[in-house]
Every structure is written in C-alpha cells, then in structure tokens.
Amino acid sequence: MHKTTKYKKSNEVIQIPARLISPNPHQPRKNFNWDDLEGLAESIHYNGLLQPITVRKCSDERYELISGERRLRACKMAGLSTIPSIIIDIDEEKSALLAILENLQRENLHFFEEAMAIERLMKGFGLSQEEVARKLGKSQSALSNKLRLLRLPNEIRYNITLYGLSERHARALLRLPTTSLMHQVIDTIAEQGLTVSATEKLICDILTKSQPKEKKGKKVMVFKDVRIFINTLNHAVTTMRKSGINATASKNETDSYIEYVVKIDKNANK
C-alpha cells in the first residue's frame, strides 16, 4: 500500500486574476473539443465557475495551473477577469503527476497524449519507468507498452488518431518494418473497418509473404551417421576380395577424426 502524500492545502477559495495564471506545462491533453469549451464557457458566463481550479505559486505574482485546464480556458473565453482558485503547496514534479492523474481519471485522454506525458515526466525529472509506474498506479509492463507506441512515426500517429483507431490497433502496427506498410494497413483498416483481430491477421499475412523464399536447387543427401559411409567402404573392400583382388582395410578413430585406409596389392595378380 502506497503512503499518501500530504500537501499543504488551503480550503479557502480565492479570486486570482486570470492574467496571472499560466497553463501547466506538463498538461498531457493537447486537443480540446471546441464545442465543449464553448458550452462550458457559456455556462460559466451565466452561472459562474462551480468547481474552482487548483494552482501553485511559482513566483511572487505568478501562479501555475495544477488541474482544471478546461475550466481555465472556458473562464478566459467567458471573459472572467478573476478565477476562483485553490492554492496548493507542491513542487513541479508533483504538479506534473497530478495533471496526468486528473486526465487519466477522466478516461478520455488519448493514448498517444498519455504516452508523451509519461515520457516527458521521465525525461524532465529523471525518473525510471518503475518510479513513474508506481507514482501513477500502473504496472511497469503496462507503462512499457504505452511508451512503445512512441516508436511509431509521427505521420502514422496522426493517421491513427485521424481514423479513430484503438491503442491495440496501434500496437499491432509496431510489428511492421516500414512506414509504407503501416500506411497500407491503416488504409485497409479504415476502408474495411477491421477489428483488432482482423488487423493482426492481415499483418501476419503481410509479414509471411514478405519473408524471402528458399532458393530451389539440387537436394543434398546428408547422412547424419558416419557409420553408413564406413559400412559402404567395408562392403567395397569385401567385393574386391571376392573378385580376387588382394585388398585390406584399416580404421583408426580419434576424438577428432576417423581414418579409414584401403590398401590394394598391385602385384597380387601378376
């Protein structure tokens, strides 16, 4: 069980000038639905902000958002000069973690945005996969699978997002060796509405067909047991003897080789 970190937090909601609040640089969500923001801004204009945003003080006058990116944007769209806020005393690393956690809990954070946020967290604060996994409440294998998605080229990520493909579709594409094949498969998925299973089968078929075929040539018979050769030689010597040829054979075997010597008397029939 993880130990709960206690933050110094004021329950008092204060009004902070909108111009003094900066967005969270570690905000994982990069795409916001414009219609939803407009609807929220209109609601705030008539009813006010029902749930305050949370911020941290980063200088004498400036504040940095911790959570509530949509609310902050909608408040500015609604023309609010001050925004109801709660100040939390935490450092930048914890602020970044909270920003990611807030978006994960909303369940509609895109998997590429999540992967990029995790990567920034690791690089920005020098954290290992194990440390980030523990802080986010994820298994290390799940975190590793998420980060693998960033191996896909940017253009492929764009098309995956454009066509609304799932994370499992994206992971299947990682098996393909070239960007052109990835484009080909994405187009097929979009045109035929392929499921993940159908996509994996398609990729398997492509990889099988792309493997180089074995060159046709003469078959070489390989005898794994050398005794067959020795028996053949013994039979040849025996045949010579039956034909009246004075032939002898000797075999010398070491750890490295077998020596087989056949001697035929050239003067025997003179």
Image: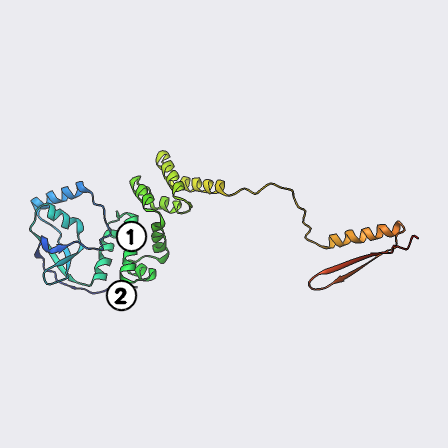
The quarter of the picture where residue 94 lies is bottom left
Where is residue 206 drawn, in percent x and y?
45, 40
Sort mark 2 into few (<14), some (14-19) or many (20+) by Cα contacts within 10 Å: few
Placement of the N terminus among the 4 image quadrants: bottom left
Q: Left or right of 208: which side holds 97? A: left
| Count of numbered circles on the image | 2
Tell me: residue 41, above or below residue 264: above
**In this orientation, which residue lies closer to the viewer: 37 or 160?**
160
SS for dot 1: helix
Residue at image location 65% in from the left, 43% down from the top: 219
**In this orientation, which residue lies closer to the viewer: 190 or 87?**
190
Where is residue 140 drawn, in percent x and y?
35, 58
Amino acid carrying label 1: it is Met
Q: Nearer the viewer, mark 2 or mark 1?
A: 1
- Which residue corresponds to mark 1? 116
Q: Left or right of 157: which side holds 62? A: left
The quarter of the picture where residue 162 lies is top left
| Mark 2 and mark 1 residues within 8 Å of each other at the beta carbon | no
Q: Left or right of 151: which side holds 244? A: right
Residue at image location 76% in from the left, 54% down from the top: 230
Res. 3 mark: 2
Residue at image location 30% in from the left, 52% down from the top: 115
Amino acid carrying label 2: it is Lys
Alpha carbons under labels 2 and 1: distance apart: 27 Å
SS for dot 2: loop
Give the mark, 2 or 1, whose residue is nearer the N terminus. 2
